[in-house]
Image (tube, rainbow, N blue to C red):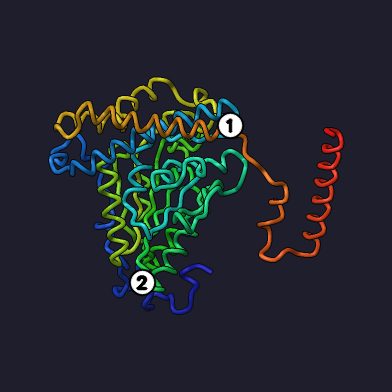
Amino acid sequence: MTVQELPGSGASSSYRPTPPPAWRPRTDAAPLLPDPEPYRVLGTPAAEKLDPELMRRCYAELVRGRRYNAQATALTRQGRLAVYPSTVGQEACEIAAAMVLEEQDWLFPSYRDTLAAVARGLDPVQALTLLRGDWHTGYDPREYRIAPLCTPLATQLPHAVGLAHAARLRGDDVVALAMIGDGGTSEGDFHEALNFAAVWQAPVVFLVQNNGFAISVPLAKQTAAPTLAHKAVGYGMPGRLVDGNDVAAVHEVLAEAVHRARTGGGPTLVEAVTYRMEAHTNADDATRYRVDDEVEAWRAHDPVELLERELTARGILDQDGVQAAKDAAETMAAALRERMNADPVLNPMDLFEHVFAEQTGRLREQAAMLRAELDAEADTEAEAGA
């Protein structure tokens, strides 16, 4: 049926080709739009207002984060990790995300965000347990307020919204910060999470680390949007665009978004423009889809060097401070290396401990069978050694 065939659609009808005057946008879009260029602090007049103590702490965390990435990558090459998704070049996003949260808040990381978890206080060995293949999660999420590292793309985002919404309903002072890569924004979970968060005005912050590639797929083949931050407008939340290698800028933007969420302002989508300096994982050959000149251009915008140059030029950081940060990072790396080089003690019976709250009869039978086999094997070894 066409418009002309609708009842009352004759020449004298009141049919309007446009919505009636009562229609109006739910939200003024202008305040939600991101800036045309990524927000920056380092190298701009805004850097004059840097908090020296905060920046020295950021620098120490960045140096430690870079060393953590290097050590984890080395452990992968040595066979101590099954896989490691490096965040070299993205440390500013990882560190800032952890630092802006209060103790009671929750971090929802993706598989690439082990550094953010470590910066929030998680033991580096526990952070790498999943990537080692020992356990799905090597830590108690409730103890650290860090959700399990999420390997499926974007599925942690609806979880973050649900937790944040529940906390608000209970009157708890909790903000959830969910991290995702540019590739994850193409998943349905991303859109569902943003829609629910905006409708419920949930206290949640979405941090998109736009590192240029979803494995080998460049951003231009994923979306035609002006920026990923522009996607926020369609859901009725603010979108912020920030230089993801400028730790001062990322910290400021995320801190504002967290404060907005905590004080009832609802969610914010933050796009941090950064770059993945290394391959997607140790199983990836990045030379097949990007050129060296592109990588080298981003090396000149290294987050560690950017901050070091700014702080030393302003007299906030001296060579003793630089060396102290490096020494602390080496101490962390040595401890991580030593502990990861020890073979884990695995108990096969753990297979049955965390399947159901109460074991089923069938599961008890299987556990008994395995226990009998292990006991028989132990007896055989004992007899052979006698």
215 horizontally vs 202: left or right: right
Most foreground residue, 213 or 164: 164
Residue 59: percent from left, percent from top: 28, 36
Read off the residue under disc 1. Answer: 80
Query: Residue 16, labelled with which disc?
Result: 2
| Above or below, 217 relative to 49 | above
Question: What residue lies at 51% left-to-right and 48% top-to-bottom?
Answer: 149
Q: Quadrant of the N terminus?
A: bottom right
Q: Quadrant of the C terminus?
A: top right
Residue 156: percent from left, percent from top: 50, 54
Q: Around disc 2, counting alpha carbons within 10 Å, would you say few (fewer than 14), some (14 to 19), or many (20 or more)?
A: few
Q: Amino acid at mark 2?
A: Arg
Residue 294: percent from left, percent from top: 38, 24
Most foreground residue, 234 or 340: 340
Q: Amino acid at mark 1?
A: Arg
Question: What residue lies at 43% left-to-right and 43% top-to-bottom?
Answer: 118
Q: Secondary structure at mark 2?
A: loop
Closer to the eye: label 2 or 1:
1
Sooner in the amino-acid sequence: mark 2 or mark 1? 2
Question: What residue lies at 48% left-to-right and 34% top-to-bottom?
Answer: 336
Most foreground residue, 242 or 203: 203
Q: Secondary structure at mark 1?
A: loop
| Above or below, 354 relative to 153 | below
Q: Is residue 96 visible?
A: yes
334 horizontally vs 133: left or right: left
Q: Are marks 2 and 1 in contact (CB under 8 Å)?
A: no
Q: Is residue 233 visible?
A: no
Quadrant in which residue 26 is drawn = bottom left
Q: CA distance from mark 2 to mark 1?
A: 69 Å
